[in-house]
Amino acid sequence: MTDRYDVLIIGAGHNGLVCAAYLAKAGWKVLVLERSDQPGGAAITREFAPGFRVSACAHILHMLQAKVIRDLNLKAHGLDLGGPSIDTIALAEDGNHLTIRQRSIEGAQVTAAEKAAYAAFIERMERHAKALAPQLLKTPPRLANAGLANAMQLAGMGWGIRFGLGKKRMQDFLRIVGMNIYDLLDEVFESEALKGALALDAVLGSAMEPRMPGTVLTYLYRLAGGLKSTLTLPKGGMGSVTAALADAATTFGAEIRTAVPVERVLLEGGRAVGVVLAGGEELRALSVISNADPKTTFLKLVGARNLEAGFAHRIGNLRASGRTAKVHMVLNSLPDFTGLEQDALGNRLIVAASRKYVEDAFNHSKYGEYSDQPVMEITIPSVADPSLAPAGKHVLSAIVQYAPFDLKGGWDAHKDSFVERVVDVISAYAPDFRDKMTLVECLTPVDIEREFGMTGGHWHHGELALDQLFMMRPTYGTAQYRTPIDGLYLCGAGAHPGGGVMGAAGHNAAQAILAGDK
Amino acid sequence: MNSYDAIVIGAGHNGLTNAAYLAKSGLKVLIVERNPYIGGASVSRELHEGWIYTNCSYVSSLLRPEIYRDLNLAKHGLQVVPFGGGVTLTQSGDYLGSYSNDEARRREYARHSLHDADALDRFSTDVMRYCRFIRPFLLRTPADPTSFRPRDLSELFFLGKKLYELGEEELYEFIRFFTMSIAEFLDEYFECELVKAALSGSGLIGTALGPYSPGTAYVLLHHYMGDIDGNVGEWGLARGGMGSIAKALAGALQEHGGEIRTGAPVAQIRVRNARTKGVVLEGGEEIDAPIVVSNLDAKRTFLTIMDPKDLPDEVLERARNFKITGSSGKLNIALDGRPEFPQLPAGCPLLKGDLHITENFEQLERGYDDWKNGTWSKWPYVDMMIPTLTDPTMAPPGKHMMSIFVQHCPATLADGGWTPDKREAFGQTVIDAIATFSPNFKDLILHTEIRTPHEIEAEVGLTAGNIFQGDLSFDQLMFNRPFPGYAQYRGPVKGMYMCGSTTHPGGGVSAAPGTNAAREILADLGRKNITPEDFGDD
């Protein structure tokens, strides 16, 4: 018992760091406890082979909230958003690729009508996303028994949607918000390649396929998070973002201890009063904030026996089984993608030829198989950032779906054949790919769970489904960052508004905790 | 005199209900039907000599008791008999009985899983709570959430109040329930695959979705929220077939002076100066009425029997985007005797209920995958009934009739449209699957009527053969049904209304859309409301 801290934060993922920085900035004495030997959680840059580095999980930055960057002065702490914004290139085997920009599309087979339809569609979707965006940086309201301020917030939301959008747009919003992206895209577009590419945006990182109701909402969520920014590859990988966050947090006075796994939350009289570290060391504080996912937080760190039975049941029922894998490769030189110039390889390359392609890829995962023809989001970050690989060489980073956590027969037996599928699929677009690549690292959801401590290897700490969003994220009664355990708070992606490197959950949790202090 | 106060297009059960209420209120009403018989999809016909086929809808539960009483349907010959129970047969030779007797059902569940027998109570309580919440809304007109008119605000307030009364925890659970998949919902209660598969069927019937699709939990509710004689969730058979419902409604209509013309297909709704004037029949005959009510689905109403120039572009676009997905087929079979199912104990009463042969989510989901790939499911989800075990009037003495509802049958196939050969192959797939459980089944078959979405559309006029006149997905429920801005039964042209399942609360032979539409029409005419509103029962 040396220091007394105001708060202990379990986990130095990006949300834990954002939360720590805000609290430290407000004058609190903060200690962040990280089990791994560097801060960053899953948002780190990983040296998967000597001299070769990639972003370990998410590799494109587009949702980090401007307010967080500003409030925490992240640019002064080394955050480099200077990288050029990149385009999305939807790969086609015949080389007739489709280039998708924020507001326009381009490609050999794109008609003028389709270009106009895309511009109109994005404008329509962005208006809806704008109606949602203010909610990202707010604590979700409770629906009942929560007093006047809360009722005002609810009314304000309804008001904002009605007057922000107007009658006709509100009708459109109320119709499409529960729809599936498959049908919506069909209403608007002709080109199957474009429909496939946009469908991918709705399902990336989730256990969903385009025909599932709710995928329009996940699409809007992605837009809402990235309204004010473009797609960029962070210089030095995602680890540079969390390094800036860690620097900001420590500058404000927070302490970060690495290589200290928390074993459990210390409870006294039903109240969280600190944590017990793996070695048995006890640390005490006025409150404890968990950046771990809800299942880890409640079922492992708190323990089901310390929870009300119904609540424990609900946490146990949260859906958080990841179906997204990450594949990293060393490229001895840049492969030759049919129909792409070499300097175009620095963009976001996606493999999602059609809605049916995405759906077929998903179908396997329903039965515990990996996709025969997986969908992918590929980046070769070393094109723009040579610091990631030795001179002349490159690194490739691919998000690959679908790779179910609970693969039939287990991943140990099937990882190699899965990687073979990935290489085969990329080779269809870059015939010389096999000659250019050498070393491969594949992080399946099982690896992601083990490496980063996310239950089920789920990037979002829980499925972004309608019943697990907003005031029900992770579950009702704990969606306001407070939990049923006094003194214990959530600040991770398992809380509203969910994952993606946004920093919103950490920001909101800090605000909620600061508000409660007064 | 060829002029009426109101013309209703389509003598399906909702058209008949709507017309009956309008006639009861004193209006001079004509209902026009393109087929030579009435009933739409609530129909029973002698399609094989001596056998009455209830060849579309085949069971009843949702028909609102208020309407039954109001329109005196008992007097007009309607009697609904609960069939009680059902069974799912497994390939291993076992079965899971779903007895209507709670104690028997519990013991049967316990035979498969003690855990699930315990969970059954919790499950039933929760689902019944949601049923009680939703039932008052069946006979109410949905509020327009974008409107500030006093009526909409007060209806929104009613909804808010009902939600508030649930209490915080139930409220959240209810919202979750609305958005979850049936598989996720059942996973929260049960552990036994067979139990879960048996219960999930109600989440899928009539939809183009699989058990893992969000939104299917609500569809379960849609199949549970009815009742027979106050037993919520119970299903029954209309004595004499589902056509008896249409006949009784027609009797009520005629009792109040309404007229029915069959064999009278409507070519167009006539509109002049943005007002309906009446209809033109396909033969060219014009019939006048200031009010025209369409019982057809929204696509057929706006895209086939209305002139596009009479409609705002927005309505045309929304009608085109309205989703009516074909996903079910039907087999109706005349049997020379009673089919045996050796894996059931002798004299098992469960045979009188609905029979199923899918025993896990994977089979159901793979059936959906087949549908997505543009083919009928190789191992289909079937909802089979032998109604003659309950109602022997449907077939000659000692003979039987079997009605087989088949899920996941696409409206168009990946290799082109339906052909007679493909229809036969589809029927054979279903018959083969059932025959694996019943050794004498194939030998007993005297006559088979196979209906794919193609036949259902051609005969009944349901677009894509969709039994609900539009998908029951949440972008098409309540104030979004059939589409935003037109969910209060009024069309875009003055004097034009919709009364089919394409409107709130959707399909299932509830007669609620027809009743709700009548209430709105009477209100517009300044007449006293004679339709039931809300519920007296709960």
Image: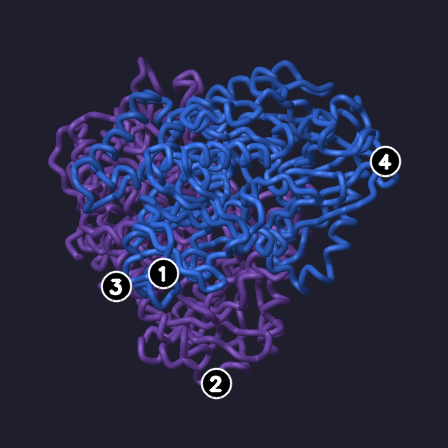
The amino acid sitting under disc 2 is Pro
Q: How dense is the environment of label 1, judged by Cα within 10 Å: few (below 14), some, or many (20 and up)?
A: many
Q: Pick whichever of labels 4 and 1 is earlier in the sequence.
A: 1
Q: Nearer the viewer, residue A223 or B496?
A: A223
Q: Are marks 1 and 3 on the same chain?
A: yes
Identify which amino acid the numbered label 4 is placed on: Pro
* The colour assigned to chain A within the rendered structure: blue
- Give residue A266's mark: 1
Q: CA distance from mark 2 to mark 4?
A: 63 Å
Q: Amino acid at mark 3?
A: Gly
Task: Judge whether A28 appears above or below A159 on screen.
Answer: below
Q: State whether discs 1 and 2 lie on one chain.
A: no
Q: Secondary structure at mark 4?
A: loop
Per the image, label 1 sits on a secondary structure element best described as strand
The residue located at (50%, 43%) in the rendering is A13
The residue marked by circle 3 belongs to what chain?
A: A
Label drawn at residue A457 = none
User: Badge 4: few (under 14), some or many (20 or more) residues near its Cα, within 10 Å?
Assistant: some
Left or right of B286? Residue A203 is: right
Give residue B398's position: percent from left, percent from top: 46, 77
Question: What kind of colouring is applied to the model shown?
Answer: by chain
Q: Does residue B304 show up?
A: no
